[in-house]
Image (cartoon, rainbow, N blue to C red):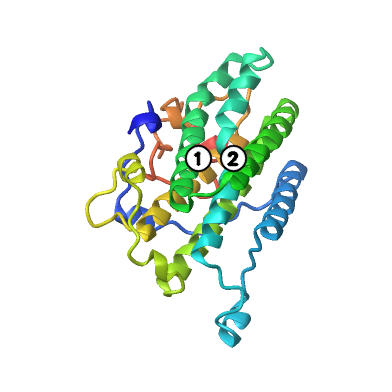
Amino acid sequence: MGSTGTAWEHPVYSDQQVRAITLSHRDVKDWTDKVALNSVRLLRWGMDFATGYKHPTEEQARNDPHKYVMTEEQWLTRFISSRALPEYLGWWELSYSGLGLAHSTRYSLIETLLEEAHNERMHLLTFLKLAKPGWLMRLMVIGAQGVFFNGFFFAYLISPRICHRFVGYLEEEAVVTYTRAIQDLEKGKLSKWQTLQSPEMAIKYWKMPEGRRSMRDLLLYVRADEAKHREVNHTFGNLVPEEDPNPFAGRCLNTSKLQPSKGLTNLKPIGWERKDVL
């Protein structure tokens, strides 16, 4: 795969698994959850405003089917803009641990978070391949990453738990976005994507079998990844950072119960509670 080669083997998703992904929302339980959720809502509003995204209500869709219709180009801009933010979560964790400010058990999270960061990078590269944006869009992506990286780095020093909850809520929104795009595609609103095939780099990375390489399939795979990130970060937000092992690295202490996996097996949309994995 050339420069996009990876040391992290992406799990194979079945057609049934990617189709079974559903919307979910973890209820706010304390003030830290509220801080994380309100931050995501503010970010979502800013992203909607910047990309011109508006989603019609059911009544608006019935009365005016063409209201707030997104073109293929607008959807790709939306995907690229949202991918510019969470790509470096693993690097924040690595930097945090490297400063010597964290307990040694925090290192067990790094492998999962770096794998997640690489996965987000593959999303970004795939959509850049499809959109072929100009230098201005690429510069905006780099700028957004620089600002977000530094801001989130300092936030992580203050509270890793809030940061993981923030990403969990952010991924909830990502699942919503891709679900709406898939629905638009299935309703025939995105005619250019009806026959569009996934880029070769995406086919190799997700190990797409013959017959499951369309643009719709690509969106299903990406949405499934976001659902996994949603589970991972909500789970990490439930753990005690200085004490608990990483349940996604096969280090659970309670093997008598169902356990998290690296793929979509035993997927819990709102994350695993601490009592379930220790």
Which of the 4 image quadrants contains residue 65?
bottom right
| Residue at the farthest front position | 135
Which of the 4 image quadrants contains residue 55?
bottom right
* Badge number at residue 262: none
Give the residue at x 63% y 41%.
Answer: 139
Give the residue at x 56% y 37%.
Answer: 87
**Quadrant of the drawing holding the N terminus:** top left
Residue identified by numbered label 1: 120
Q: Which class describes the residues within 10 Å of circle 1: few (<14), some (14-19), or many (20+)?
A: many
Q: Amino acid at mark 2?
A: Pro
User: Tag count in the figure?
Assistant: 2
Q: Amino acid at mark 1?
A: Glu
Examine the rendered structure and indicate whether residue 64 appears above or below residue 111.
below
- Whole-percent x, y for residue 170 in the image: 62, 48
Examine the rendered structure and indicate whether residue 229 appears above or below residue 242.
below
Residue identified by numbered label 2: 86
- Whole-percent x, y for residue 106 in the image: 58, 21
The answer, for residue 106, to whether it is visible in the render is: yes
Residue 274 shown left or right of residue 157 in the figure: left
- Whole-percent x, y for residue 272 in the image: 52, 41
The answer, for residue 168, to whether it is visible in the render is: no
Whether the residues at callouts 2 and 1 have beta carbons within 8 Å, the answer is: yes
Q: Which class describes the residues within 10 Å of circle 2: few (<14), some (14-19), or many (20+)?
A: some
Label 1 sits on a secondary structure element that is helix
Give the residue at x 67% y 30%.
Answer: 160
